[in-house]
Amino acid sequence: MTMISKTAVGIAVGIAGIFVGYCFYFDQKRRSDPDFKKKLRERRKAKKQAQKASSKMPDLRDHELVQKFFLQEVQLGEELLACGEIDGGVEHLANAVAVCGQPAQLLTVLQKTLPPPIFQILVQRLPVVGQKIVSQTQMAEEDVE
């Protein structure tokens, strides 16, 4: 077993102390910036808007768009659930189930993988998402006519 010299330990502790001090200094400088909270709110608002915009239903006649949308919604739903954002995750998974070609099979897979309370929320949200798709399809047909 080798002994580490006192000078090596002292140097390592000194470097670690300098690094921690550096972190505290710049964190304090960042937080004392008058625009910090404003920028933070803007970033969060932009992120929410981007998530809402990404959930816009595709044209259901275009199979490629529907497939891409389905994969995107499943991925977003899983990521949000992993982060603890249950409402957002369930919303995206409900969108995926709504556009899925075989929703019964997808629901059985989700039932096995999701915790029961989250799966119940998903099942309750499906009729609302179904209505949303029907209304968007009707509006798209009216635009064509």
Image (spheres, grey):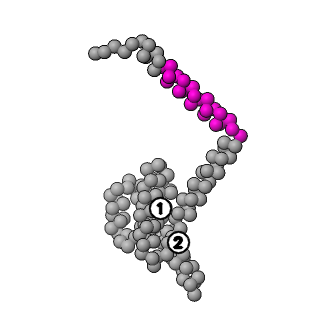
The residue drawn where x is 35% and y is 65% is 106
What's under tag 2, amino acid-wise?
Lys
Q: Is residue 122 visible?
A: no
What's under tag 1, amino acid-wise?
His
Q: Main secondary structure of the magenta part?
A: helix
Q: Is 111 positioned to the left or the right of 94 in the image?
A: left
Question: In this picture, is 23 found above or below 13?
Answer: below
**Secondary structure under badge 1?**
helix
Q: Which residue is mark 2?
A: 132
The residue drawn where x is 43% and y is 58% is 75
118 vs 138, nearest the viewer: 138
Residue 39 in picture, x, y percent from top left: 65, 47
Question: In this picture, is 126 found above or below 31?
Answer: below
Residue 13 in picture, x, y percent from top left: 47, 19
Q: Which residues are magenta?
A: 13-34
Q: Residue furthest right?
A: 34
Residue 91 in picture, x, y percent from top left: 49, 61
Q: Which residue is mark 1?
A: 92
Magenta-drawn stretch contains 91: no
